[in-house]
């Protein structure tokens, strides 16, 4: 056991070893993975992170970086060996600078996503990354997982929103890369290497992020569509009419909405009649509300004329805006409340999505005895949460048989995605959940290059071991 007391002297009160204090850091948000650790360290600044990394390096202790611990792939949970240290960035919560004319904000890794959005808004700017866990997840975790969310269609994912990083390496050196530059062709892009690496290459301690003008008006429509094919045609129509104003285009099946109505008290179905699918369309504009409403009405009128939608509800105030969005954002929670779920976070070229959904859903229902499709997601980004629940009314007794199908179901879905050139992890990362599957589908040259990068940056394999990439054979 390495001499943890030497760390305790420097980090009094910020080095947790009491099981009552460490427990929340040793299991993930959904309670799917649980591990053990020597301690949980919570430094308040970059020097503190560097000191911990030097100590871990000297004593060959593995490090598991952790932000808000909301990740969905088990990347922030230590393994069961009890030999690693969890490095929580949660106390690094300073917004270091906002440069309004340059449209940038520099925030430490532990600032919550909501905190970054709020600081930007207070300065009269928009930080557009947005996802249901935004009150708890951190900007460091968002960048480490290259999180997507609901505005990717217009603003891109976390990678697209980041201009510079500050990173502590495995041996405790600091890379000062906090540049607010939109053009910088001075060699290999280290920033893009760390973004999406899920804590396996280094520790992100701060980031400089892009800001945008705040929209003057926002409106959302919840539209009933007969099929996924009609939803793709509706997306095309919305893009043609709104251009950059189209900030989100989400798709969800009627099963998803029924689950939300069942498990979320506040949920109200907003239309007179039900359909197989619904699209949630958000329009943001620097124009005033009347102009935005006019644009939305015109687009929906065209959609009805072309028989793409059968009915739609539009928000006319912020309460309605939030209520319509909640129907989409509460799906994960409702699916969890319904029971066990088997999740797939896939992406495909948008054109292929309707056939994929129709055919793969049908085949799953034919081949797997216990299955109900729960399909929703960011259609505008080609990203679907292609999830499976036990059939309605299956009851808790069916749970073991349902879960026993998981590996076969995953393979079935991911083989189909891979055949069509898609991705088996669109926005949730690999962590431990998809590490081996991703290795199986990955191009062999890409696999060797990734292993070489890991070896170069972390030769002792101390950064978040067991996550993202199968280690190179030694
Ligand atoms: P953690 O969970 O703590 O860590 C995630 C990974 O990043 C781990 O591998 C960890 O080791 C690493 N890491 C964390 N911080 C650092 C750091 N500072 N330096 C290096 N590595 C680090 N994701 C989407 O993309 N889109 C969504 O729409 C979406 N919706 C969600 C909805 C809910 C309700 C929940 C619970 C999650 C959702 N997620 C979504 C998952 C999303 O990936 C996480 O919420 C978020 O990006 C992770 O941030 P975190 O701070 O919680 O990171």
Image (tube, rainbow, N blue to C red):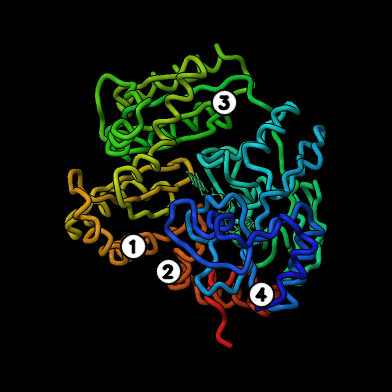
Q: Verify CB contact (< 8 Å) between mark 1 and mark 2.
A: yes
Disc 4: CA contacts within 10 A as few (<14), some (14-19) or many (>=20):
many
Q: Are marks 3 and 2 in contact (CB under 8 Å)?
A: no
Q: CA distance from mark 4 to mark 3?
A: 48 Å
| First in residue order: circle 1 vs circle 4 | 4
How far is mark 4 from mark 2, CA to CA? 27 Å
Q: Secondary structure at mark 2?
A: helix
Residue 284 is labelled as: 3
Compare marks 1 and 2 and give the one earlier in the sequence: 1
Work out whether mark 4 precedes mark 2 in sequence or the reverse, and give the earlier one. 4
Q: Which residue is mark 2?
A: 437
Q: Position of residue 67 (x, y in %)?
A: 62, 52
Label 3 vs 1, first from the N-terminus? 3
Within 10 Å of disc 2 (Cα), the crowding (few <14, some 14-19, many 20+) is some
Local crowd size for mark 3, using a 10 Å CA cut-off: few (<14), some (14–19), many (≥20) = many
Does label 3 or label 2 sit earlier along the sequence? 3
Q: Which mark is drawn over residue 61?
A: 4
**Between 151 and 97, which is closer to the camera in this rendering?**
97
Observer-side mark, 3 or 1, equals 1
Question: Regarding mark 1 in the picture, which secondary structure is present there?
Answer: helix
């Amino acid at each position: 056991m390495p001499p943890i007391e030497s760390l305790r002297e420097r980090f009094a009160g910020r080095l947790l070893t009491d099981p009552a204090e460490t427990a929340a850091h040793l299991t993930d948000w959904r309670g799917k993975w649980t591990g053990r650790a020597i301690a949980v360290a919570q430094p308040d600044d970059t020097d503190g992170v560097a000191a911990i990394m030097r100590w871990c390096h000297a004593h060959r202790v593995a490090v598991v970086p952790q932000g808000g611990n909301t990740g969905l792939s088990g990347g922030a949970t230590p393994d069961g060996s009890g030999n690693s240290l969890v490095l929580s960035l949660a106390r690094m919560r300073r917004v270091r600078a906002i440069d309004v004319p340059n449209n940038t904000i520099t925030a430490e890794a532990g600032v919550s996503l909501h905190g970054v959005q709020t600081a930007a808004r207070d300065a009269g700017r928009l930080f557009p990354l947005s996802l249901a866990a935004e009150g708890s997840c951190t900007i460091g975790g968002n960048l480490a997982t290259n999180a997507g969310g609901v505005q990717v269609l217009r603003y891109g994912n976390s990678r697209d929103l980041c201009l510079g990083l500050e990173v502590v390496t495995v041996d405790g050196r600091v890379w000062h890369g906090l540049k607010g530059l939109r053009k910088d062709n001075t060699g290999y892009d280290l920033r893009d290497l760390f973004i999406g690496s899920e804590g396996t290459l280094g520790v992100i301690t701060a980031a400089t992020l892009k800001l945008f003008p705040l929209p003057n008006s926002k409106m959302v429509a919840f539209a009933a569509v007969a099929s996924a094919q009609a939803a793709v045609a509706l997306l095309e129509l919305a893009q043609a009419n709104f251009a950059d104003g189209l900030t989100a285009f989400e798709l969800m099946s009627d099963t998803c909405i029924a689950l939300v109505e069942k498990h979320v008290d506040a949920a109200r179905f907003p239309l007179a009649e039900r359909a197989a699918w619904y699209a949630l369309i958000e329009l943001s504009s620097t124009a005033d509300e009347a102009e935005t409403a006019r644009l939305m009405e015109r687009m929906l009128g065209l959609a009805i004329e072309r028989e793409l939608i059968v009915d739609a509800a539009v928000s006319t105030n912020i309460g309605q805006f939030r209520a319509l969005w909640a129907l989409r954002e509460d799906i994960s929670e409702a699916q969890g409340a319904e029971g066990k779920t088997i999740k797939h976070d896939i992406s495909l070229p948008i054109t292929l999505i309707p056939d994929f959904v129709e055919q793969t859903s049908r085949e799953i229902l034919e081949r797997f005895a216990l299955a109900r499709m729960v399909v929703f997601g960011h259609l505008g980004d080609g990203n679907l949460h292609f999830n499976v629940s036990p059939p309605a009314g299956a009851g808790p007794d069916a749970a073991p048989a349902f879960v026993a199908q998981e590996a076969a179901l995953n393979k079935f879905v991911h083989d189909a995605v891979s055949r069509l050139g898609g991705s088996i992890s669109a926005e949730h990362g690999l962590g431990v959940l998809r590490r081996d599957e991703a290795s199986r589908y990955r191009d062999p040259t890409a696999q060797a290059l990734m292993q070489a990068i890991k070896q170069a940056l972390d030769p002792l394999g101390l950064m978040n071991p067991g996550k993202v990439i199968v280690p190179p054979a030694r």
